[in-house]
Amino acid sequence: MGFTKKHIFNEHQNLVANYSKVLGHPARISIIQLISDKKYCNCNELVKAIGLAQPTISQHLAEIRKIGLLKQTVKGKNLFYSINIEKLNICRRVVNDFFVKTQVSCGK
Amino acid sequence: MGFTKKHIFNEHQNLVANYSKVLGHPARISIIQLISDKKYCNCNELVKAIGLAQPTISQHLAEIRKIGLLKQTVKGKNLFYSINIEKLNICRRVVNDFFVKTQVSCGK
DNA sequence: GCGTGATATTGCAATATCACAATTTTATAA
DNA sequence: TTATAAAATTGTGATATTGCAATATCACGC
């Protein structure tokens, strides 16, 4: 079929999967690392640093934005991205809690 | 194109992405939860509990196996799956370290 | 051996994802 | 207003993923 049957899973399962899916591509891992290293980073810098075309980077940025991990600041012609640390922390906890709970369940 | 240009990213970025990708589907989240809750679980139980067809579950199990997260025990006709806790712990650390390092970079 | 039950594999259709060229939008600078 | 530069959007082709029916495989009991 090609599409995921999300309705048969609960909200939490879909949430963990959604967050993880965004991290499931090395370009997006690289983008997040570059933005956090440089604090502020525009699209062009990412294009040069990573070596994918501008529309491709823009697309990956949109995926990361969808889960709220990015902040934007307009400065002249440039659009600078930075990490939404609060949201990053939420993602970390959601994913890590899944691991921890799984580990605890195994040990009971 | 449709395929990921993995060669332009480093090993660590691909590793984080690989682990995350496996968690990037709610069926696989659900499978991991069910197996860890029941300690041992065969394919049929997962099929009944989740409501996807047997080949679909089998396929998702294969994805989870690829990153080493599952152990198998044959008992008669049944094949029981359990969680490889050591590997789960490694995955947890790899993914969580990514989050923590990102957070630290933002704060510097 | 033969049937049975459990799981993996194969083949296929539908959808999603990845990557990029071309274009559009937006905002500044001249 | 016009040029320019940055980034988003659109359109497209190639590949990957999701899901399932049909089939194959494998291990047991008879």
Image (cartoon, coloured by chain):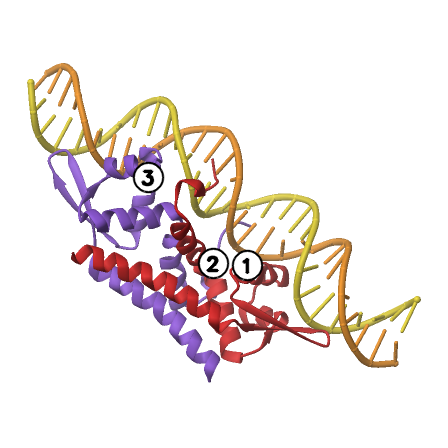
Chain colours: A purple, B red, C yellow, D orange
Where is residue B9 shown, x and y percent of the image?
Answer: 39, 44
The image shows a total of numbered marks equal to 3
> Looking at the image, is B82 positioned above or below residue B108?
below
Where is residue A105 shown, x and y percent of the image?
Answer: 45, 79
Front: mark 2 or 1: 1
Q: How crowded is the residue under tag 2: few (<14 C-alpha within 10 Å), some, or many (20+)?
A: many
Q: Give the amino acid at mark 3.
A: Ile
> Looking at the image, is B108 positioned above or below residue B69?
above
Residue bearing mark 3: A50
Residue bearing mark 2: B22
**Going 33% across and 41% down the picture, which residue do you hit?**
A59
| Nearer to us in this view, A62 or D21 | A62
Residue bearing mark 1: B66
Where is residue C16 shown, x and y percent of the image?
Answer: 45, 47
> Looking at the image, is B1 positioned above or below residue A25?
above
Q: How crowded is the residue under tag 1: few (<14 C-alpha within 10 Å), some, or many (20+)?
A: few
> Looking at the image, is B81 positioned above or below residue A17?
below
Q: Mark 2, chain letter?
A: B
Callout 2: helix, strand or loop? helix
Q: How crowded is the residue under tag 3: few (<14 C-alpha within 10 Å), some, or many (20+)?
A: some
Residues flagged by tags 2 and 1 on a common chain: yes
Give the label on residue B87, or none. none
Q: Are marks 2 and 1 in contact (CB under 8 Å)?
A: yes
